[in-house]
Image (cartoon, grey):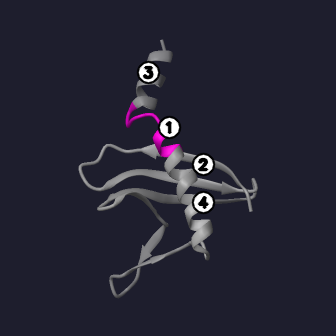
Amino acid sequence: MEITDVRVRRIASEGKLRAYATITFDNQFVIHNLKVIDGKSGLFVAMPSRKTKSGEFKDVAHPISSDFRATMQEAILQAYENAPPPGADEEYEEDTAE
């Protein structure tokens, strides 16, 4: 399975959440709402999740193997490093509207 697109939207946050990501595989399957989190050991990618009745969070989608998880995380964090800072898209759109 090939990663064919990664999009990252940095957010302005005082918490540990740094960005949201979307990843596409084989131009056929997409996963939205991955999160780039600033943890104790540095940045990592959290899978999309939902809250259960008991209050726990369960991943909605996740890689089966640790190798593929590492591949996904590497691609997303690389896109994060290259993403414009929060608000940069809005500034650009305003500048080009004149």
Which amino acid, mark 3? Glu
Question: Which residue is the site of mark 1?
Answer: 82
Q: Closer to us: mark 3 or mark 2?
A: 2
Q: Closer to us: mark 3 or mark 1?
A: 1
Q: Marks 2 and 1: CB-CB under 8 Å?
A: no
Front one among 41 and 80? 41
Residue shown at the point (58%, 59%) measured from the top left: 72
* Residue 67 percent across, percent down from the top left: 61, 68
Residue shown at the point (75%, 53%) measured from the top left: 27
Q: Closer to us: mark 4 or mark 2?
A: 4
Q: Which mark is residue 71?
A: 4
- Residue extending furthest top? 98
* Residue 8 percent across, percent down from the top left: 51, 46
Residue 89, compared with residue 81, is above or below; it is above
Residue shown at the point (38%, 33%) measured from the top left: 87
Which amino acid, mark 2? Val
Question: Which residue is the site of mark 3?
Answer: 94
Q: Which residues are magenta?
A: 79-87
Label 2, label 1: how far apart the Cα atoms are:
11 Å
